[in-house]
């Protein structure tokens, strides 16, 4: 049986982990692309706010967690004023990187590397837990900076 498990893809291992642990909060979207991408969509509740979250997996060695901290809030001039803050956060918080989407969504990203034979869904689950703990501790501070009025 161990040999059969070794041949599972990251996506199959993740689905098996979710089933075995009765974790039912994910909706899985499979894309018809060249990298065989699957997106595990869910949400995180942080300080009473529901934040959309996704885990992206494909044939590459990367597994990406993305959490939408605030939708469409950093556009135009706000992006220019927030660039220094975002760079500072990226330099000081090693586990997470913060980005702004084309629509102005403020995003938290965490990336782990794993090939099919080395992917461990328990480690990914630990990373999700760290993400939630970080957001619980820092969400108010992050939102205060985002909503700060310019002088």
Image: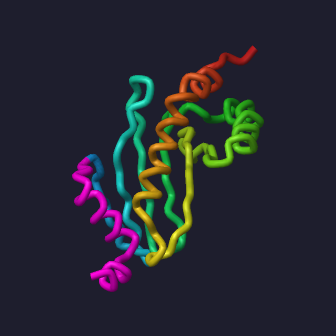
Q: Relative to 67, is 21 on the left or the right?
A: left
Q: Is residue 51 above or below residue 28?
A: above
Question: Is residue 11 depicted above or below 86 in this figure?
Answer: below
Is 18 included in the stretch rendered in magenta?
yes
For the stretch drawn in magenta, the main secondary structure is helix
Question: Quadrant where the C terminus lies?
Answer: top right
- The residue nearer to you, when weighing 2 against 120, is 2
Residue 141 in the image, given as x and y percentages of width and height: 61, 24
Residue drawn at the location 62% of the way across and 48% of the way down: 95
Residue at point 28%, 53% (across, down): 27
Classify 112 as above or below 89. Answer: below
List x then y, in percent, for residue 130: 51, 43
Q: Residue at x 45, y 78 (%)?
A: 117
Judge from the rendering whether residue 37 lies leftward or rightward of residue 89; answer left or right: left
Residue 129, x across and y down, in percent: 45, 44
Q: Is residue 46 magenta?
A: no
Q: Residues in magenta?
A: 1-24
Residue closest to the eye, 32 or 65: 65
Q: In the rendered view, would you say 76 is above or below 47?
A: below
């Amino acid at each position: 049986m161990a040999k059969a498990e070794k041949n599972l893809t990251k996506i199959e291992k993740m689905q098996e982990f979710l089933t075995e642990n009765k974790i039912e909060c994910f909706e899985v979207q499979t894309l018809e692309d060249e990298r065989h991408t699957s997106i595990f969509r869910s949400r995180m509740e942080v300080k009473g706010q529901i934040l959309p979250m996704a885990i992206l997996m494909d044939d590459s060695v990367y597994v990406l967690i993305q959490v939408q901290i605030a939708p469409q809030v950093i556009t135009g001039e706000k992006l220019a004023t927030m660039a220094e803050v975002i760079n500072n956060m990226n330099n000081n918080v090693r586990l997470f990187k913060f980005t702004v989407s084309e629509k102005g969504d403020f995003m938290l990203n965490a990336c782990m590397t794993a090939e099919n034979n080395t992917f461990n869904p328990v480690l990914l689950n630990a990373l999700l837990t760290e993400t939630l703990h970080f957001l619980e501790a820092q969400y108010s501070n992050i939102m205060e900076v985002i909503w700060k009025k310019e002088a």
